[in-house]
């Protein structure tokens, strides 16, 4: 369970960073 929780947290962080990257890219374009 602990490992799964850590994996979920990492996935959430990557998802947020990806969304921010898309927003910045759209703003730049």
Image (cartoon, rainbow, N blue to C red):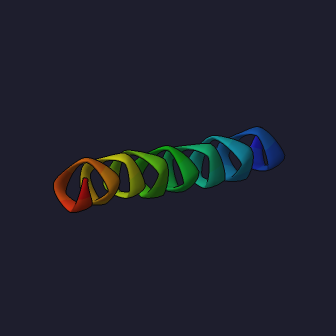
* Near-viewer residue (1 or 8): 8
The residue lying at 76 percent from left, 39 percent from top is 4
Q: Is residue 7 left or right of residue 23?
A: right
Residue positioned most to the front:
29
* Near-viewer residue (19 or 4): 19
Q: Is residue 12 left or right of residue 29?
A: right
- Asked if 20 appears above or below 22 in the picture, the reply is below
Residue positioned most to the left:
27
The residue lying at 25 percent from left, 53 percent from top is 29
The residue lying at 76 percent from left, 48 percent from top is 2
Q: Is residue 8 left or right of residue 27?
A: right
The residue lying at 33 percent from left, 55 percent from top is 25
* Near-viewer residue (10 or 16): 16
- Asked if 12 appears above or below 24 in the picture, the reply is above
* Near-viewer residue (13 or 19): 19
Residue 27: % across, % down: 17, 55
Q: Say how many tags the image has.
A: 0
Residue positioned most to the right:
3
Q: Is residue 16 left or right of residue 26?
A: right
* Quarter containing the N terminus: top right
Residue 6: % across, % down: 69, 53
Residue 24 location, quadrant: bottom left
- Asked if 4 appears above or below 24 in the picture, the reply is above
């Amino acid at each position: 369970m602990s490992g799964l929780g850590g994996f979920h947290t990492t996935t959430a962080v990557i998802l947020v960073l990806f969304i921010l990257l898309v927003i910045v890219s759209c703003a730049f374009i």
